[in-house]
């Protein structure tokens, strides 16, 4: 691992969306689509095609006044850069921010309130909400930070939930049994609606902070402040006590209705399959506020932006979780083929026989989504799927190094699980303890890494090799 000086990025943390878009644009990582791209599938098709290569801004999508953007955190290195870190240090930085949140700072005058709509709300007229995948049940807000308050103590929670446009001022929502679900349950117990705000268009670090794996009653906006290195400015909503980032592009204010459930879905999800329709809660919209000339963020389901936003905070938490018991865990990675959720790779410095199995068991209990864990030695690059496969191919024997745990809790969105019950698999692909060192000596040509092709090859190599062979 590089020393902390070398591994620092040359940048400081990015605190606004507009600054980040500007930097992506200046460095050839953002493109402007031609005006008027259609909101039904067409916009998502362009965004998905360029995902990981370029963020895209869509002016006048479907003839709408408000521009859409997508793909601002579709690359691991971009996320590290936005944090002002290197890829090597970003997980520990994220975990540090999660454990050391910074209280927000309240302001009364906010860009998010430059324009306020409170009467005759019509979501599709006010906002350019796209339809993404083939069988999605219509237009969806996919990059909205849903902010709610614990009705008993006022502590806020932030999550990203899929939001279906169910009517002019009505959104169907999927709320999985985590913190927002708990706050809604508390409100519903007293027959009350749960006031919420949906923030669309926010800086990359607040977006990332919203996905931090924290205990209940820890405000993700305070993690955003810690990542920024300065308290996040927030403003009170115009129709409720919910606080939202002052520099939000667009804020939808509303309430999750008590004791109302309506059909929502299907909608494309991160496992690359459709999340099935459900009878879900409903949000009634009371107001929409936005900046002048606002930008609307959309995340194409199952794309890199979607996968990485979930994967990086989980990696940070899993790494810290494992290191509590095993200081020799060097790094972890949630592979993208495993949809950034299901397959974990762990790199260790082996210390004693049997320990790799303990680490496997510790990891499998670390998050219910984990389905397969592969553990490798420190010479294997866990960010390279070919290296992982090589380690399994040459260091693992199924009758000796495989752990299978049937009937555990898994991901409900994994179509092969039955009602969220899933088997877990652990693969110990470390070199068997006590092996003869030469047996596992990795081949190497001395000097290969130091070769610079530019200094070895002739600048103008003969194109006609046959003619070159005929010459004396
Ligand atoms: Mn939370």
Image (cartoon, rainbow, N blue to C red):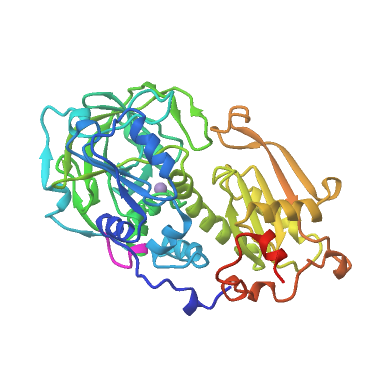
How far across and how far down the image is residue 83, in percent?
Answer: 39, 63
Determine the residue positioned at 62% across, 55% down: 384
- Answer whether residue 160 is magenta in the image: no
Q: Image quarter for residue 378?
A: bottom right
In this view, 277 is above or below 464:
above
Instruction: Decide which of 191, 270 is in the foreground and name it.
Output: 270
Q: Image height check: is 352 above or below 71?
A: below
Which of 360 and 156 lies nearest the eye of the viewer? 360
Using the rendered image of the protein, determine whether residue 141 is visible from the camera's viewpoint.
no
Which residue is rendered at x = 76% and y = 59% of the image? 430
Pinpoint residue 470: horizontal percent, then vertical percent.
72, 64
Q: Dividing the picture into quarters, in which one does residue 125 lie?
A: top left
Total count of labels: 0
What is the chief secondary structure element of the magenta stretch?
loop
First to last magenta residue range: 227-232
Pick the quarter of the image with the N terminus.
Answer: bottom right
Left or right: 219 as drawn, with respect to 402: left
**On the picture, is 27 further left or further right than 329?**
left
Looking at the image, residue 113 sits to the left or right of residue 46; the answer is left
Tell me where residue 82 appears, x and y as whole percent: 37, 61
Q: State the quadrant of the C terminus.
A: bottom right
Residue 204 image position (x, y, % from top left):
35, 54
The part of the image, by quadrant, that contains residue 151 is top left
Q: Residue at x 60, y 71 (%)?
A: 453
Residue 375, visible in the rendered structure = yes
């Amino acid at each position: 691992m590089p020393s902390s000086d070398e591994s620092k990025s040359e940048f400081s943390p990015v605190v606004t969306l507009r600054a980040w878009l500007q930097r992506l644009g200046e460095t050839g990582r953002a493109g402007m689509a031609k005006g008027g791209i259609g909101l039904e599938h067409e916009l998502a098709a362009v965004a998905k095609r360029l995902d990981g290569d370029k963020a895209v801004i869509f002016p006048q999508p479907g003839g709408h006044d408000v521009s859409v953007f997508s793909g601002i955190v579709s690359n691991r290195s971009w996320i590290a850069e936005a944090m002002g870190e290197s890829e090597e240090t970003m997980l520990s930085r994220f975990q540090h921010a999660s454990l050391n949140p910074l209280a927000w700072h309240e302001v009364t005058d906010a860009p998010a309130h430059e324009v306020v709509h409170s009467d005759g709300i019509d979501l599709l007229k006010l906002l350019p909400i796209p339809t993404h995948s083939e069988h999605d049940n219509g237009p969806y807000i996919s990059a909205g930070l849903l902010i709610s308050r614990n009705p008993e103590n006022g502590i806020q929670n932030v999550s990203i939930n899929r939001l279906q446009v169910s009517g002019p001022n009505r959104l169907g929502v999927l709320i999985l049994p985590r913190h927002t679900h708990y706050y809604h349950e508390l409100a519903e117990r007293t027959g009350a609606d749960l006031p919420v705000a949906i923030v669309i268009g926010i800086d990359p670090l607040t977006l990332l902070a919203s996905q931090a794996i924290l205990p209940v009653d820890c405000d993700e906006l305070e993690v955003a402040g810690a990542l920024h290195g300065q308290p996040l400015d927030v403003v009170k909503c115009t129709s409720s006590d919910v606080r939202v980032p002052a520099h939000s592009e667009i804020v939808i204010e509303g309430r999750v209705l008590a004791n109302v459930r309506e059909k929502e879905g299907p909608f494309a999800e991160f496992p690359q399959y459709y999340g099935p329709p459900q009878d879900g809660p409903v949000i009634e919209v009371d107001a929409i506020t936005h900046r002048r000339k606002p930008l609307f963020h959309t995340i194409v389901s199952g794309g890199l932006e979607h996968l990485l936003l979930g994967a990086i905070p989980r990696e940070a938490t899993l790494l810290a979780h494992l290191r509590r018991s095993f200081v020799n865990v060097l790094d972890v990675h949630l592979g993208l083929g495993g949809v950034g959720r299901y397959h974990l790779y762990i790199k260790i410095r082996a210390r004693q026989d049997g320990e790799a199995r303990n680490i496997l068991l510790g990891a499998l209990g670390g998050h219910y989504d984990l389905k397969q864990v592969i553990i490798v030695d420190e010479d294997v690059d866990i960010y390279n799927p070919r290296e992982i496969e090589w380690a399994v191919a040459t260091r693992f024997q199924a009758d000796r190094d495989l752990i299978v745990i049937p009937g555990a809790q898994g991901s409900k969105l994994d179509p092969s699980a039955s009602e969220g019950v899933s088997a877990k698999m652990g693969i110990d692909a470390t070199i068997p303890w006590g092996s003869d060192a030469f047996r596992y000596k990795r081949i190497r040509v001395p000097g290969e890494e130091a070769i610079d092709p530019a200094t070895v090859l002739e600048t103008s190599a003969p194109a006609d090799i046959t003619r070159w062979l005929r010459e004396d």
